[in-house]
């Protein structure tokens, strides 16, 4: 999808406002070179002050982007493009972030077992003169898991830095019966929408 503008994008200093090697790998798999820069934003926004899950994840992603951009500019490293994302697992009206303990991870996974839930990923792409925000959501359906399976998974350590307590691209993927929507939204960066935004941002430079 990005081939017509790839020569343009490869000349840009692209920063991913994240410490996630998964997100970096996704972007590099489509041919872009990116620099990882973990955001220092505290992610302390109150989800109850937003009208929707989408608004919450987009605002969190925006704050990550702005913090990283401002810090890099102060260091004399002005990025051409900063990409930020925030992923949240939801069950009904509840939001599941990263578990703070093994007990919380067990509670999350027990509640997701044998049920469907929705994953939201909000993305912000900021160039020097434009900001684009969007959210993708995907429904994920878990098979039934017993207590030993859940505890065994937690023992791998994988759940502790993942929203909802699982990583679909890792061992946690073995619990997933099916996915309705963009798989990459669950991984943490919806590629189709991201590429669409980048193409629209820079297609006007093709003929320059």
Image: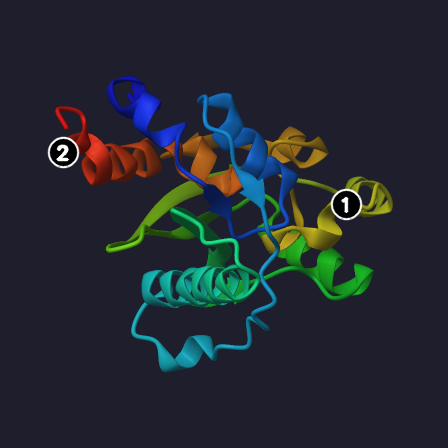
Q: Position of residue 30 (x, y in %)?
A: 44, 22
Q: Quadrant of residue 194?
A: top left
Q: Position of residue 208 (x, y in %)?
A: 14, 28
Q: Would you say 62 lies left or right of 144 here?
A: left
Q: Position of residue 140 (x, y in %)?
A: 47, 40
Residue situated in front as seen by the camera: 24 or 205: 205
Please tell me whether residue 203 is drawn above or below residue 77 in the rendered image.
Answer: above
Q: Would you say 152 lies left or right of 110 here?
A: right
Q: How many dots with numbers?
A: 2
Tell me the SS state at disc 2.
helix
Residue sitting at x 45%, y 41%: 14
Q: Quadrant of residue 92?
A: bottom left
- For disc 2, the marked residue is 204
Q: Which mark is residue 38?
A: none
Q: CA distance from mark 2 to mark 1?
A: 50 Å
Instruction: For marks 2 and 1, give the one nearer the viewer.
Output: 2
Tell me the SS state at disc 1.
helix
**Badge 2 local density, few (<14 within 10 Å), some, or many (20+)?**
few
Specify the quadrant that holds the N terminus.
Answer: top left
Residue situated in front as seen by the camera: 97 or 190: 190
Q: Would you say 191 lies left or right of 129 here?
A: right
Please tell me whether residue 29 is drawn above or below residue 119 in the rendered image.
Answer: above
- For disc 1, the marked residue is 150
Q: Would you say 137 lies left or right of 184 here?
A: left
Q: Is residue 142 visible?
A: no
Q: Position of residue 60 (x, y in %)?
A: 45, 66
């Amino acid at each position: 999808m990005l081939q017509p503008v790839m020569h343009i994008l490869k000349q840009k200093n692209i920063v991913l406002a994240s410490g996630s090697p998964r997100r970096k790998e996704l972007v590099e798999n489509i041919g872009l070179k990116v620099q990882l820069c973990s955001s220092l934003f505290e992610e302390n926004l109150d989800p109850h002050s937003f009208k929707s899950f989408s608004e919450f994840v987009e605002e969190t992603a925006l704050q990550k982007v702005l913090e990283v951009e401002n810090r890099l500019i102060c260091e004399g490293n002005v990025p051409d493009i900063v990409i930020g994302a925030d992923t949240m697992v939801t069950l009904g009206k509840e939001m599941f972030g990263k578990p703070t303990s093994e007990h919380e991870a067990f509670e999350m996974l027990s509640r997701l077992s044998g049920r469907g839930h929705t994953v939201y990923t909000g993305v912000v792409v900021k160039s020097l003169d434009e900001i684009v925000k969007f959210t993708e959501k995907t429904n994920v359906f878990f098979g039934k898991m017993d207590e030993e399976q859940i505890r065994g998974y937690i023992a791998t350590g994988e759940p502790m830095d993942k929203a909802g307590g699982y990583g679909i691209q890792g061992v946690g993927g073995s619990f997933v019966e099916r996915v309705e929507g963009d798989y990459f939204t669950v991984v943490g960066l919806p590629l189709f929408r991201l590429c669409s935004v980048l193409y629209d941002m820079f297609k006007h430079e093709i003929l320059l």
